[in-house]
Amino acid sequence: MNLTINCLKLQLPPGFENRAEAIARCLGDELLLQPWSGSHALYHLQVAPQTVRPEQSDREIAAQIAQAIHQTTGEKR
């Protein structure tokens, strides 16, 4: 699978500013783990707000966001 993200805008709650870069890197890895069934060419994709907690790891937050992106594209798990 080939996945290209030209622009990613994460809006994280206060206190997560220093974690945004690591979460974004993990998000790329987590998106590759999703069971994609084909190609997707999307100009814009917005997912529902996600509840994240400070005790979650960057990878856990990224996995949660990746699942939301996967579901928003209409992919079935």
Image (spheres, helix red, strand yellow):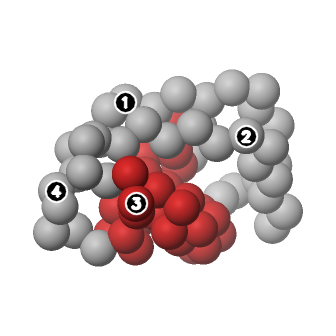
SS assignment at label 4 = loop
Q: Of the numbered discs in the image, which one, if any, rests on residue 53?
A: 4
**What is the C-alpha distance between the residues marked 3 and 4?**
14 Å
Q: Residue at x 53, y 28 (%)?
A: 46
Of callouts 3 and 1, which one flags the residue occurring earlier in the amino acid sequence?
A: 3
Q: Which residue is mark 1?
A: 48
Q: Residue at x 50, y 36 (%)?
A: 72
Q: Specify few, some or many for label 4: CA neighbours under 10 Å numbering under 14, 14-19, or 20 or more.
A: few
Using the image, determine if residue 39 lies above or below residue 63: above
Using the image, determine if residue 51 lies above or below residue 33: above
Q: Of discs 2 and 1, which sits in the foreground?
A: 2
What is the x, y in percent for residue 13? 27, 41
Q: Of discs 2 and 3, which sits in the foreground?
A: 3
Of callouts 3 and 4, which one flags the residue occurring earlier in the amino acid sequence?
A: 3
SS assignment at label 3 = helix
Three-letter code, disc 3: Asn
Whether the residues at callouts 3 and 1 have beta carbons within 8 Å, the answer is no
56 with respect to 40 (left or right): left
Of callouts 2 and 3, which one flags the residue occurring earlier in the amino acid sequence?
A: 2
Whether the residues at callouts 3 and 4 have beta carbons within 8 Å, the answer is no
Q: Which residue is mark 3?
A: 18
Q: Residue at x 46, y 56 (%)?
A: 20
Residue placed most toward the observer, 61 or 70 = 61
**What is the C-alpha distance between the residues marked 4 and 2?**
25 Å
**Camera sees residue 34:** no
Whether the residues at callouts 2 and 3 have beta carbons within 8 Å, the answer is no
What is the x, y in percent for residue 17? 38, 51
Of callouts 4 and 1, which one flags the residue occurring earlier in the amino acid sequence?
A: 1
**What is the C-alpha distance between the residues marked 2 and 3?**
19 Å
